[in-house]
Image: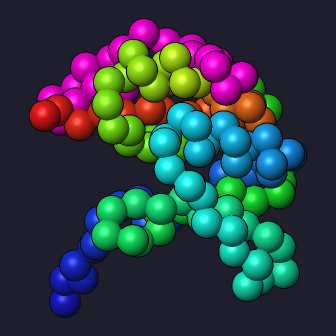
Amino acid sequence: MTETTRERPVWVEIPATDLNRARKFYEAVFETKLIENNDGPEKMLMIPSANDAMCGHLYVGEPATQGDGITAHLSVQGTLAEAMDRITASSGEVVSETISIPSGAFFYARDTEGNSLGVFRYKV
């Protein structure tokens, strides 16, 4: 029997030592409001995506050290150059040039917590 695999990734969890600082960064860079969720034992900030779905959250935790851990790739509206400007204006760090791939382009960055981040723009 063959099992059908749904879209990947299913969810992303992004640790932050300072949740308020991380919230300001992600809301500015991705031009969206994170949704506070206090349903569980710890406060989370939900990352919205298309059709009012959620694609992940920020939580109080210890980010991996530089060079360790995974890289979460999130898409933006507008140009990548504009996203780069928002990252530096929000105390993040752009760490690569733009990289083109068949479905669009992206660059690597670090958020205010030191997490590795891929900022992606679909080809239009």
Residue 73 occupies quadrant = top left
Identified at 56% across, 55% down, the residue is: 33
Q: Count all numbered tags in the image, as a single digit.
A: 0
Q: Position of residue 16 (x, y in %)?
A: 78, 47
Identified at 86% across, 46% down, the residue is: 17
Along the line of sight, which residue is nearer the eye, 67 or 102? Answer: 102
97 drawn magenta = yes
Determine whether, in the image, residue 61 is placed left or right of residue 105: right
34 drawn magenta = no
Q: Position of residue 90 (x, y in %)?
A: 67, 26
Q: Position of residue 122 (x, y in %)?
A: 23, 37
Determine whether, in the image, residue 10 is placed left or right of residue 19: left
Q: Position of residue 101 (x, y in %)?
A: 22, 26
Examine the rendered structure and indicate whether residue 37 appears above or below residue 110: below
Examine the rendered structure and indicate whether residue 16 appears above or below residue 57: above
Examine the rendered structure and indicate whether residue 6 appears above or below residue 1: above
Identified at 31% across, 70% down, the residue is: 51
Identified at 41% across, 71% down, the residue is: 53
**Residue 61 appears in view:** yes
Q: Which residues are magenta?
A: 88-106
Quarter of the image that includes the N terminus: bottom left
**Residue 68 appears in view:** no
Quarter of the image that includes the C terminus: top left
Check the image and name the residue furthest to the top. 97
Residue 34 occupies quadrant = bottom right
